[in-house]
Image: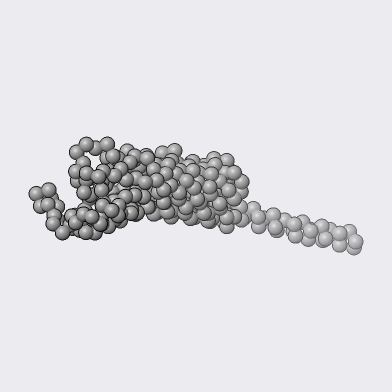
């Protein structure tokens, strides 16, 4: 009788301890890419679109003294960005990211209200001067990420960046109708993103804001569209998708 009782207790104990192990194994089977976050370095391709504009200040003495330009406004524009991501995990919740190849295509514009436009020069009462940019950006970002909840994870990031405008016109000689911009800029950025784990890849939508700190304006006192503006800083908000 005691032999049968010991046998039943042994069977019940085996069943009791095997159930959690089976549950954990089943949970692990439901996880996509369960070892993904254990890798030290991740690579990814990033594609997105952006909205950008210039934040600027008037050159007050010149703007008040002249009468050829009444109002200056910065116009929002839409562009695209393409980048290659490198992510270095520091710990379970912290990582450092950069984009060794990061191209941003934008076309910003200033809008001028002219009381007496020069029609032979193509001016009208409302005249826009567009500035096209192809920017090569090198950011360094610190990323803080939450615990993984099954196939989902959220993170926040912040960092600094340096930029080089491949299409800068600061050195243009015939620039009577241009706003001249310098090639180099630097700034800060911050954003939030979400990791979605699929069986073959991780998809990451992200929204990010960037603030240019350097003065981009190469002011020319002889150009009426330039001498009324003092400092120009870039502003951008972007939405992107990354596949790792």
Q: Is residue 187 left or right of residue 92?
A: left
Tell me if residue 50 can be seen. Answer: no
- Quarter of the picture containing the N terminus is bottom right
The colour style of the image is: one colour
- What is the x, y in percent for residue 230? 31, 50
The residue furthest left is 120
User: Where does the image place residue 210, in percent across and percent down from the top left?
Assistant: 42, 51
- Given residues 208 and 53, the one toward you in this image is 53
Q: Residue furthest right?
A: 2
Q: Residue at x 78, y 60 (%)?
A: 12
Q: Quadrant of residue 7?
A: bottom right
Percent across and percent down for residue 112 are 22, 56
The answer to whether any part of residue 166 appears in the image is yes
Residue pictured at 21% horizontal, 59% vertical:
70
**Horizontal arrangement in the rendering, residue 43 relative to residue 228 (left or right):** right
Does residue 240 sit above or below 4 in this rendering? above
**Residue at x 45%, y 49% (from the top left corner):** 188
Q: Residue 5 placed where, x, y %? A: 86, 62
């Amino acid at each position: 009788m005691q032999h049968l009782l010991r046998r039943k207790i042994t069977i019940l104990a085996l069943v009791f301890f095997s159930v959690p192990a089976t549950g954990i194994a089943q949970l692990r089977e439901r996880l996509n890419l369960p070892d993904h976050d254990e890798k030290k370095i991740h690579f990814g391709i990033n594609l997105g679109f952006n909205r950008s504009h210039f934040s600027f200040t008037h050159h007050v003495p010149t703007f008040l003294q002249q009468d050829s330009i009444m109002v200056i406004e910065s116009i929002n524009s839409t562009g695209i960005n393409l980048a290659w991501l490198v992510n270095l995990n520091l710990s379970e919740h912290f990582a450092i990211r950069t984009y060794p190849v990061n191209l941003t295509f934008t076309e910003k514009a200033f809008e001028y209200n002219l009381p007496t436009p020069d029609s032979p020069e193509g001016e009208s009462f409302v005249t826009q001067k567009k500035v096209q940019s192809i920017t090569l950006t090198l950011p360094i970002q610190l990323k803080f990420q939450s615990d993984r909840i099954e196939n989902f994870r959220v993170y926040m990031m912040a960092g600094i960046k340096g930029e080089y405008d491949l299409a800068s016109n600061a050195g243009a000689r015939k620039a009577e109708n241009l706003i001249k911009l310098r090639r180099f800029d630097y700034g800060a950025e911050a954003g939030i993103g979400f990791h979605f784990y699929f069986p073959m890849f991780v998809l990451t939508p992200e929204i990010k804001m960037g603030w240019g700190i350097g003065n981009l304006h190469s002011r020319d006192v002889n150009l009426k569209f330039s001498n009324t503006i003092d400092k120009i800083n870039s502003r951008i908000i972007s939405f992107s998708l990354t596949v790792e």
